[in-house]
Structures are given as C-alpha cells and as structure tokens.
Image: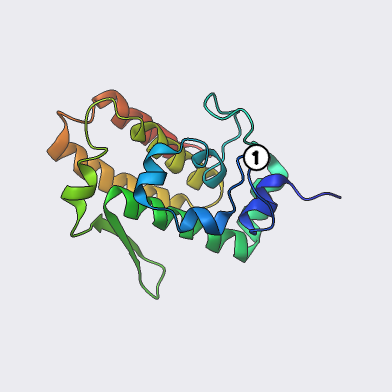
Amino acid sequence: MEQHPLVSFYLNQNRTPEGYMLTEIWGWSHENMEYVHTYIQWLFPLREKSGFNLRAPTLNDEVIKEFKSDIKLHENLIRSFRLMLDFYGFEMHEDGDGEIRIQQAQDFEEKSSYWLNPYNHNFLRITRILRSMTILGCKNYAETFLACLNDLYDKYHHDISENTLNYWNNAVRSD
C-alpha cells in the first residue's frame, strides 16, 4: 500500500508539489515563512481542503492514527510547531514530567510587529495550527499555546478581534 503524501512528507521522504522538503522548510528565513503561502497546509494539515492551496492533501482517519502512534511523525510535528512559535515570537519549554510552557521570547516585540495587527493572515494560520495540533494528538500543546494567546488578547485586544479569539478557542475545543 502506498504511503499517504502527508506521512511521507513528514518523514522527509517526498516534496510538496511546490518542491519543498520538510527539513528545508525548517531552515527557511522568517521572510520565506511570511511570504510563501503554500507550506502551512503541509506542516499543519486538516481534514478539510484548503481554499489557499488546493494541491495540499487532507487528513483522514488512517493518517491521524499514524501521527498519534509514530514517534518520528510526532517529533517532527512538534519541531514544526516550535518553528512557528519562534516565527511568532514565542518559545516553548518542556520539563521531564511532560509539562509544557509557552511564553513570549525576548524578541517577541520585534517578531510580533509583523503579524500582531488587525486582520492579519497569520491569525488564520494560528487557527490552523491549533486545530491541526488538536486533531493530530497534540492537544496539550494546542491548549498551552491557546492559553498564551488568550493572555495576549488581554493586552492586544485592539489588534486581535474577539471573533479571532473565538476561532482560536473553538479550534482546540473538539477533536
């Protein structure tokens, strides 16, 4: 049986239709991450087809099961999550007991100036990240990131709409 494109991509065995390997994306500049719009659907896939990247595959029950049971897929997903956290100006720490903390990094003000403004397309990306992490068995990471985003809303409610905050919260509520 042929391996699903998302699985082989996440095992760094194939390229996206645009020619990107997973490990190449991990090495991108923040400028590439901001202006290329066809990688996020591969890093954080959903069950539904993307309106922005019709060539990106979608999740099914088999793929979800593989992500939840294969340690390499899980590790690579977490690495992609860390990449996006860094892009947004956050850092994640995990202790030996499995406790996860996400907080603003020292360069948060600089990095957030590129995305933390009303109606920014990165708000949609964040919704996708939260939803995908939840579906793929990393709900604890999504919940921790969501708590950080809720705190951010308290300070930046003039930049983050209540509607956006509701999307973020709903993205983590169900599997």
The residue furthest bottom is 96
Q: In this view, does 117 lie above or below 83?
A: above
Q: In this image, 146 relative to 71: left or right?
A: left
Q: In this image, 162 relative to 97: left or right?
A: left
Q: In this image, 55 relative to 77: left or right?
A: right
Query: Does the image show residue 143?
Result: yes
Compare residues 161 and 61 and report the one nearer the observer. Answer: 161
| Percent of width and height locating residue 63 | 68, 47
Query: Does the image show residue 144?
Result: no
Residue 122 placement: quadrant? top left
Label 1 Cα crowd, 10 Å radius (few <14 / some 14-19 / many 20+)? few
| Percent of width and height locating residue 171 | 43, 35
| Percent of width and height locating residue 55 | 64, 32
Q: Name the residue under label 1.
A: 17
The residue furthest right is 1
Residue 50 placement: quadrant? top right
Compare residues 50 and 63 and report the one nearer the observer. Answer: 50
Q: What element carries label 1?
A: loop
| Percent of width and height locating residue 106 | 18, 60
Q: How is the image coloured?
A: rainbow
Which residue corresponds to the image point at 16% horizontal and 31% vertical from the top-left?
157
Q: Is residue 116 above or below residue 101?
A: above
Q: Report the label total.
A: 1
Amino acid found under the numbered disc labelled 1: Pro
Which residue corresponds to the image point at 73% horizontal and 46% vertical from the top-left?
4
Which residue corresponds to the image point at 14% horizontal and 28% vertical from the top-left?
158
Q: In this image, 142 relative to 41: left or right?
A: left
Which residue corresponds to the image point at 20% horizontal and 52% vertical from the top-left?
108
